[in-house]
Structure formats: structure tokens, C-alpha cells
Image (cartoon, helix red, strand yellow):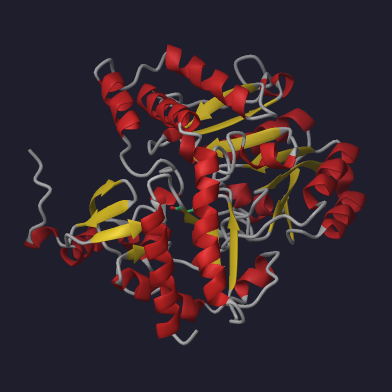
Amino acid sequence: MISLSPNIQNTSSSLWSEALAYIPGGVNSPVRAFRAVGGNPFFVQSAHACYLRTCDNEELIDYVGTWGPAILGHAPEAVLRAVVQQAKKGLSFGIPHPLEVEMAKKISKLVPSIQKVRMVNSGTEATMSCIRLARGATGRDRIIKFEGCYHGHVDSLLVKAGSGSLTFAHPDSAGVPAALAALTITLPFNNLMAVEEVFKKNGSQIACIILEPVPANAGLYLPAEGFLEGVQALCQEYGALLIFDEVMSGFRLAPGGYQELSGIHPDLTALGKVIGGGLPVGAFGGKAELMDQLSPRGPVYQAGTLSGNPLAMAAGLAQLNEMEHLDGWNQLEEKGMLLEKKILSAIDQRPLTFHRIGSMFCLYFREGPINNLDDAKISDTKKFAQFFHGCLKKGLYLAPSQFEAGFISLAHTKEVLEKTGDIIIETLGEIGY
Ligand code: HOZ
């Protein structure tokens, strides 16, 4: 039996010393290291509903939600039941099984642009596979991405990237061959003229544009009116494919992601997070004709031993079914509105900007407007760090970087959201706002 009760050997600080000795930087993903806010990360022994329990036996209200997947809250009954039931039948088959078909049908029913979908194990795999498919299908090598958008740690996409690579000032990673990075053109988000210029000069060489329709890896900002429509029209004019990275927005902003809300249907979509229900999952899909260019039908190779893993399929399906059953997306919108109202009334006239769409949000420490990476970068990250620690001391856990979004789940009750607003207001007061 594993004991969950904390003891002196298993406090966050003792675990951190050991982690530093055996894991690079002490973490398995850089943003967890608290480098952007100072101090050391806490360790978690369990998570339930909207709470984390640390190894120091403290309870925290969690707005990271394992970086998005915990849309129902942590360890929801329906998902646990499905995972346990499936585990008893086998953990991995490496050969087709019924849940893969059920998941593929579900995704193509919910996401407007997807007729066929392939499962992978992470968002990184999903975007990497989209890029390869786009290059294979068009016979072109160059791609366009936007500054501050983060699409996982894919070589071609770690160029002026957001999230941890932005937080730690490595938007262009060491180890990415210069010749490969040279094929990636980066442009400012929300600047349609810049996209047009690139197409005019290099239109016949561009395989695709990849973007987060709602960029959420440099904080959170929204597409300007007409921007995504304009990008799509240019792609169509020049024969390039449009890829939406809906790893975070997919199944969160609406059952069919931001493409359902906006009515803009990309050629390919990268997905992840919510369809894994907390287990490691990604997926990518699009029109049947395009997806059929993948091996074994087509010449574009893509594979994965654990892809479509039965436990992950069971968890994701249970999570999506529960969201549908509970009318989860409308509930999330109401919760988001409640938090927004409270925060907006408190930050009025102060040099702060609050952005929210559905259950995703970000508080920037600068006045608006914020429409792209350059705008986001001017945020006062020192103030953010003070704010982060002030909230944490009061039991509120926000993402440990200005350049990440917050996630509300169905488990965040009205009372918890009110309390969150109070803590935020009190902390802002303490740090001089
Ligand atoms: N912003 C990242 C996900 N889109 C955070 C997760 C990570 O890098 O570990």
C-alpha cells in the first residue's frame, strides 16, 4: 500500500532536493519549475474536484487543471469508473479496438472540419503530424507560424514560440537545425498585411499556416475581427493549408472548439487535453481526402505504439459524454462570466488587463490593448510574480508564469469563484494596485 499521508521525507522541499539530483531542472516539463516567479514548486499528493492537496498537506484551489484537461475538475467519478472498467480488460492492445472507433466517431461528430481523425499521444505529436501531412500533401517545405503561439516542442515550431520557451527566454531552442528553422516564417499575430506580404513573395512555397485561433501560450489574447477569415482566404488563394491548433481550445470553448464558435473551418486541426480526460492523448484530423494521404493508405508516414490507447480512449470518451450530459459548456461560460465580473469591477482604472473567453482567462500586469506577443511581453512580470505568490499563500494556485492561461472547471463552484475573486482583489491591494 502506498501511504498518502505526508511525512518528513516527502515534504515538497525534501522531494525538490531529490528531484534536482535525478531529473533535469527537477521537472518533467519546464513551466513547472517556478523559475518565472521565483521559489520552488510544491509537490502534489492528490487532486480532487477543483483542489490540489500538496505533499505539505495544504489544500489549494487550482486554476491550472493539469494545463487544461481537467475540464470536469480532478478525478471525476464518471472518468474514474470508465478507466477502472477498461483497465480490468487490458491496458494496451497495439491492435484495433472498439473504443478507437467510438472516439473517432465522436470527434468527427463534434468538430465541424473533421471527417477522419488519427489519435496520437500528445499535442506535440498532433501538431508535428499536421505539419508533415501538410508538407506531404502540398509538396512544399515552408510554413508560417505566429510569434508567441506555442505548438509543443516540435523542431519546426520552436521558433519564436510561447509558453515555457518564452517564459525561459528560449523562443528559439538550441538543437533545432538552422536549416530547418529557416523553413519556418514567423509573423505577428493579428497582422493580416504581414501574412499577405509573405504570400505575395513566397506564395508557391508555403505548405501551411499553423496557429492557435485563440493564442493561449503568451497569456491569452483573441483574434481581431476578420483576421482568421483573412488568413483562410489567403491560404485558399495560394494553395496552402490552414491548421488550427485547438489543443487547448478544442472541446473547451465549445464542443467543437473555436472553429464551432467562429464558423471558420480549417483544413487540419490538432487536438489534445480534454479528449484524454487527464491521460496522455492528442489527435489530428481533417477532410477524409487529406487524412487518407497518411500511411498505410498514403505516402506520409506517421505511427505510434500507444496511439489510441484503450485507457486514454475510455477516459476521454467518459469526459466528453459527461460534458454533453451536464451541458458543461454553458455552465463553464456562466462560471467564467462570474469570475470576470468580479475581477473587472476590481481592476477598473488600474494598469491591468483581464482577458477571458469561456473558461480560459489571463490577468496581464499592464494596460491594454493586448493583441500579440509584443503587447503581451510588456506586461510587468515582476508584479505578476508577487501576485502569484500572494495568491498562493492564500491557497489559490494560478499558472506560475504570466505567459500561461488559467482554466476554470465544472468543479469550481459559485462559492469557490467568489472566494477566488476576493483573494485576487486582496492580493492586488497588497502589491499596490
Ligand atoms: N502552455 C503549455 C501547454 N500548452 C504548458 C504545459 C507544459 O509545457 O508543460
Estimate the x, y position of residue 33 in percent, counting from the top left: 36, 63
Estimate the x, y position of residue 333 in percent, counting from the top left: 55, 48
Camera-side residue of 288 and 433 = 433
Q: Is residue 426 above or below residue 226?
A: below
Does 318 sit left or right of 156 as displayed?
left
Q: Which quadrant of the structure image shows residue 176?
A: bottom right
Q: Can residue 421 be seen at all in this image of the molecule?
A: yes
Q: Which quadrant of the structure image shows residue 96?
A: top left
Q: Could you tell me which residue is drawn at 51 percent across and 76 percent down?
A: 381
Q: Could you tell me which residue is drawn at 39 percent across and 24 percent down?
A: 314
Q: Can residue 405 be seen at all in this image of the molecule?
A: no
Does 139 sit left or right of 390 as displayed?
right
Q: Which quadrant of the structure image shows residue 286?
A: top right
Camera-side residue of 185 and 91 = 91
Q: In which quarter of the image is the N terminus?
A: top left
Does 291 sit left or right of 93 as displayed?
right
Which residue of the protein is positioned furthest toward the bottom in this rendering?
Answer: 432
Camera-side residue of 409 and 135 = 409
How many badges with numbers are in the image? 0
Q: Could you tell me which residue is drawn at 87 percent across and 44 percent down?
A: 234
Q: In this view, does 289 lie above or below 127?
A: above
Does 353 sit left or right of 190 as displayed?
left
Estimate the x, y position of residue 56 in percent, counting from the top left: 17, 62
Estimate the x, y position of residue 312 in percent, counting from the top left: 39, 28
Q: Could you tell me which residue is drawn at 60 percent across and 37 percent down?
A: 270
